[in-house]
Amino acid sequence: RTAYVNELLMSAGKVIKCLAAVAWEAKAPMVVEEVEVAPPKAGEVRIKVLYTGVCHTDKYTWSGSDPEGVFPCILGHEGGGVVVDVGSDVKTVKVGDHVIPLYIPECRECKFCKSGKTNLCQAVRATQGKGLMPDGTVRFTCKGKPIYHFMGTSTFSQYTVVPEIAVAVIDPKADLQKSCLLGCGITTGIGAARNTAKVTEGSTVAVFGLGGVGLSVIMVCICFSCFDLVFCVYILLLPFPFPTPPVYRSFCFLLLLLLPVVVVVVVFLLRKKQTRESHSTST
């Protein structure tokens, strides 16, 4: 504990050298490099990243398909860590806080944050999409070159710097190894169920895919006491990473087309059965 506190005190206001997975260019293997992480400026927070998840969006940007993807950069946006340094004017977090970096922050002052309809905060959107901090600069350098940020978080680094409004403080008793998934996968699933599908108590729900997002949908549906959950593992093996006969490919493609139909039929039959049972009970 003492050694950890000393580490925090010694690093305050100084450049930190640490390891990070740097994506130098699209589709090229990421390289673990020693990077320099500058101290936070006004309204910014420096975090020691203890855990990070890997999301499909990381792969999407790395593939070169993301129109906002800039290189070289440090990917990663599902992280959890401890605040080690804060810039001036920071009021909502302090050194030692356990936090989750947020790729969609909330300033609570812009038009979108006040609308009640969306939290696509305007405060950092213009610069975040360019791989920059709100002041238009970066906090990472490697081999004398600037390294861009990713989604305002860059959790594939042992240390990162984010705006104060892009930090959520959590209970220090919470396991960061699991809590880091709150940065994207879990909240995406919750939003899909609560805000998009608008599930309520008694809803019948079909879940396609049981990855991190799909499992999060199931968790929130259980919280809403949905009386029927149709679990459907949706596996698509295209493109195949190994040689496969055309017949196998055709079978998988046919399965992809038929699964939604099967789910709809199952849901319809369940509804019909429940209606019949309800009618029998009432009579």
Image (tube, grey):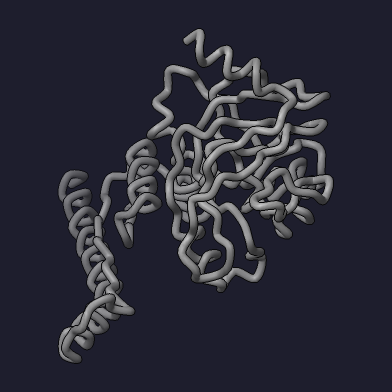
- Direction bottom: furthest residue: 246
Q: Residue at x 73, y 32 (%)?
A: 39
Pick the front one: 85 or 3? 3
Instruction: Report the side of 41 relative to 65 (left or right).
Output: right
Q: Residue at x 22, y 49 (%)?
A: 278
| Residue 77 visible in the displayed image | no
Q: Quadrant of residue 65?
A: bottom right
Q: Residue at x 31, y 78 (%)?
A: 238
Q: Residue at x 43, y 29 (%)?
A: 176
For residue 23, above or below residue 28: above
For residue 114, above or below residue 39: below
Residue 100 position in % (x across, y down): 55, 34
Q: Quadrant of residue 40?
A: top right
Residue 148 position in % (x across, y down): 68, 54
Residue 265 position in % (x across, y down): 24, 70
Pick the front one: 114 or 226? 114
| Residue 72 visible in the displayed image | yes
Residue 224 position in % (x across, y down): 38, 39
